[in-house]
Image (cartoon, helix red, strand yellow):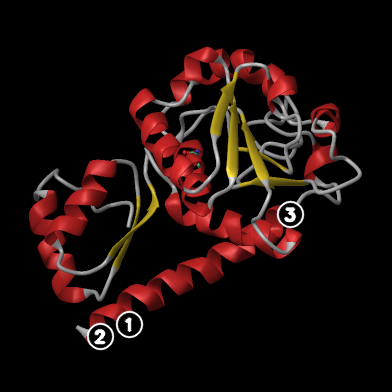
Amino acid sequence: RPDIHFGKKESVKDTARVLGRIYDGILFRGFSQKTCEELAEYSGVPVWNGLTDDYHPTQILADLLTVKETFGSLDDCTVAYVGDGRNNVANSLMMGCAKAGVRYVCCTPKELWPDEASLAEAEEVAKRNGVDIRVFDDPVKGVKGANVLYTDVWVSMGEESKTAERIKMLRPYQINMDLMRATGNIDGKLMFLHCLPAFHDFNTDVTKDTGALEVTDEVFESKYSKVFDESENRMHTIKALFVSALCDRATI
Ligand code: NVA
């Protein structure tokens, strides 16, 4: 609910305990990662992160399922994320790929490189799973050999004041057919993913004057694009998360 106002007239700790008496689980989709963690600590029920400023883990489960469904397996697969390399989706994609043993390449300007501690943590996990993580500021070099090109909006929630600066900075990171071709896999194993919503045409208030931002309409509407399978898979993976956490609880 948008009108909960965590911490305004009631501490998150108290709200957590109230919600925990009413619900069997809480899916938090908000802003502060800290609020999400406090809900998990004090509610006494399973809490799922449905999106915060820092992470978007439930999205990544759907992404990996989409890759597996499309290619038949996650083996020998390289995911290249192109854009804002340290937003919520990029942070979780980096860790999700590391955990799933999928090579991850982040193509992003120096100013937006992943946070050092998160990168080190993900590298450690990736190494244990036999893969590596690489970060490039040159998208054309970075995507070489990639099987999945993934992007997200250039300006994430809460950063709206940076819109003009970001559009300028990230323009060279737009996913277009030239970048798809730069993978070297245009006739082979290649797909495009986006967590949505995507700015790919003139049909939104934000892009009615600018047109496509992070991905061209040509790529978004191409045979490589699996974005609607990906969005459907959110439903299946989130249901699976609910079942696994609630069934575990039932057996305690
Ligand atoms: N990075 C995006 C994700 C939207 C699902 C945002 O924070 O707006």
Numbered label tally: 3
Residue type, label 1: Cys
Determine the secondary structure under disc 2.
Answer: helix
Residue type, label 3: Lys
Q: Which residue is depicted at the point 61% across and 17% down? A: 137
Q: Are marks 3 and 2 in contact (CB under 8 Å)?
A: no
Which picture quadrant has residue 203?
top right
Determine the secondary structure under disc 3.
Answer: loop
Instruction: Assess disc 3: are there few (<14), some (14-19) or many (≥20) residues with their C-alpha within 10 Å of its C-alpha.
Output: some
Classify residue 17 as left or right of residue 173.
left
Residue 5 in view in this figure: no
| Residue at numbered disc 1 | 247
Determine the secondary structure under disc 1.
Answer: helix
Q: Which sits in the foreground, 66 or 20? A: 66
- Relative to residue 44, is residue 218 depicted above or below? above
Lower sequence index among marks 3 and 2: 3
Q: State the CA–CA distance, disc 3 to disc 2.
A: 36 Å
Q: In the orientation shown, which residue stands out farthest toward the right? A: 187
Q: Which residue is depicted at the point 33% across and 52% down? A: 2
Q: Which residue is depicted at the point 50% across and 37% down? A: 90
Q: Are marks 1 and 3 in contact (CB under 8 Å)?
A: no
- Mark drawn on residue 128: none
- Quarter of the image for the C terminus: give it: bottom left
| Residue at numbered disc 3 | 226
Q: Are marks 1 and 2 in contact (CB under 8 Å)?
A: yes
Classify residue 237 as left or right of residue 206.
left
